[in-house]
Image: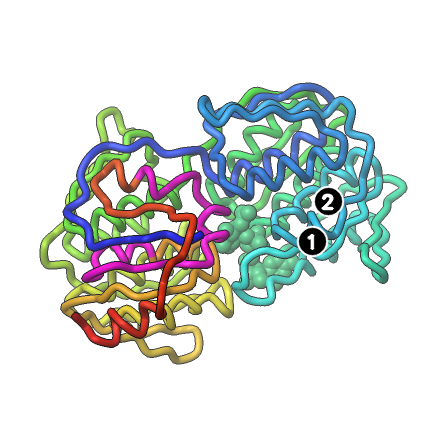
Amino acid sequence: MYVEIKQSPELSGEVSLYGAKNAVLVIMASLLLTSGKSLLKNVPASSDVLHMITLLESLGAVISFDHETHELWVDTSSVDKWRVHPDIMKKMRASILVMGPLLARFSRADIALPGGCVIGTRPIDFHLKNFSKMGVEIQSGGAYLKTHVRQLSAKDLVLEYPSIGATENLMMAAVCAPGTTRIINAALEPEVLDLITVLQKMGAQIAIEPPATIIIKGEDALKPIEHELVVDRLEAGAFLLAAAITGGTVFLSNANKDHLAVFLLKLEEMGHLVRSGPKGTGILFKATKSPQAVSFKTAPYPGFPTDLQAPMMAIQCLAQGRSVIDETVFENRLVHIRELQKMGAQISVEGSKAMVTGVDELYGASVIASDIRASCALAIAGLAAKGTTIMTGISHWRRGYDHLEKKLASLGASIALSHSLHLTKPLSETKSAQKY
Ligand code: UD1
């Protein structure tokens, strides 16, 4: 399977966003803290979500997912297992997020080390160190990391870096630890705040103290919830960048402008027009025809999101001037550069920095997506590249997005998912090399 992308006209129209993938995965895991039936709304049918369904079912949950209404019902009454099979664990890094809830529910969790995208070493030491502090005993060896605890203890937990996953995992354990836990230097991304809202709906007592401390008072029993997910700021970024590179105009009807402040600032600095929608909800975007290159550096929220670094790099390739992009969150998140270079982009790399010099044209090529956001970057570049781009490695595309190609096509993009590959020779040898 592959995605075929052709040079496209200016995108135009209105689109509504799904709930955030990075919120739904952890919120699904958090339902293990309850016993009963919960409802999540606006859930994207991305393959990571389907994978989390498989994981929860393997623990005994009963789940129904309506792909039309995007409603996900999860009944956790019959969850009776605390061991996640390594095959399930290895498919997705977010699988680690069941560890906190399983420890809270069963006082034990047997897991394998998680898999996921190839974007650096991505250890889980912040999770494990702090679970140990809460009294969890961890034994490694064999296929599983076996963990158990007599009674989770409330503690002051300090994160040396505001890791999203560690903040979420520790918070989900702490909601059932008697006493007060404080997570200091916590991540406060909109998706973390959405999890906090969900835990509060369940009955947990959680407060945030400036600058970045989460205070949790442990509760005995938590109840099932109904919740509409925070919208996906990364899906929003994909549409804005697709509109930017094609010179188009789009309205994202349910986007939250505040969740993308630094990213939108950079788009404005490029010369694009960004306005809030009516009543403060929604983003109206109109692309400039002569975009100027901008430099940026990724950082934890509210800084520039690392998940939009690759897609934003794609549009710098065709901007006027030079952009310096510093990836500070992950040490190996520049793999997409090699693929953009195949399309004619002029990019050099020094350590964590990419230097992009704008070119007049990109060319369709055969490219490989190496992670979720790289797939988005390559699709965006493909929309402006002369000719046809064939993107393989699309398991990543499907992991992160629910039929993004169809939504882009509804705005006028020439992009489609194809099921067979009939190529006599790699496109990279034909189109980009010949620069037709
Ligand atoms: C989450 C997001 C992912 C995003 C990333 C950074 C989900 C499901 N995924 O991933 O899309 O790209 O945040 O915004 O929400 N680290 C350690 N030790 C740890 C944990 C993390 O060294 O125990 C490091 C990581 O290697 C990385 C940095 O901390 O360099 C941030 O990672 P983290 O915030 O934990 O990312 P994830 O939660 O895995």
Q: Residue 242: give x, y in percent of width and height.
A: 26, 49
Q: Quadrant of residue 363?
A: bottom left
Residue at image coords 81%, 57%: 143
Amino acid identity at mark 1: His
Q: Which residue is mark 1?
A: 127
Would you say the residues marked 2 and 1 are in contact, meaning their CB atoms lie under 8 Å apart? yes
Q: Residue at x 29, y 47 (%)?
A: 415
- In space, the residues marked 2 and 1 are separated at their CA atoms by 9 Å
Q: Can the viewer see residue 13?
A: yes
- Residues 265 and 239: in front is 239
Is residue 396 on the magenta stretch? yes
Residue under pointer 2: 99
Mark 1 C-beta closer than 8 Å to ligand 1? yes
User: Which of disc 1 and disc 2 is earlier in sequence?
Assistant: 2
Tell me the kind of residue under disc 2.
Met
Residue 10's spot in the image, x, y percent? Answer: 15, 46
Q: Which residues are magenta?
A: 379-407
Which residue is most to the left? 289
Q: Is residue 222 magenta?
A: no
Residue 187 shown left or right of residue 266 in the figure: right
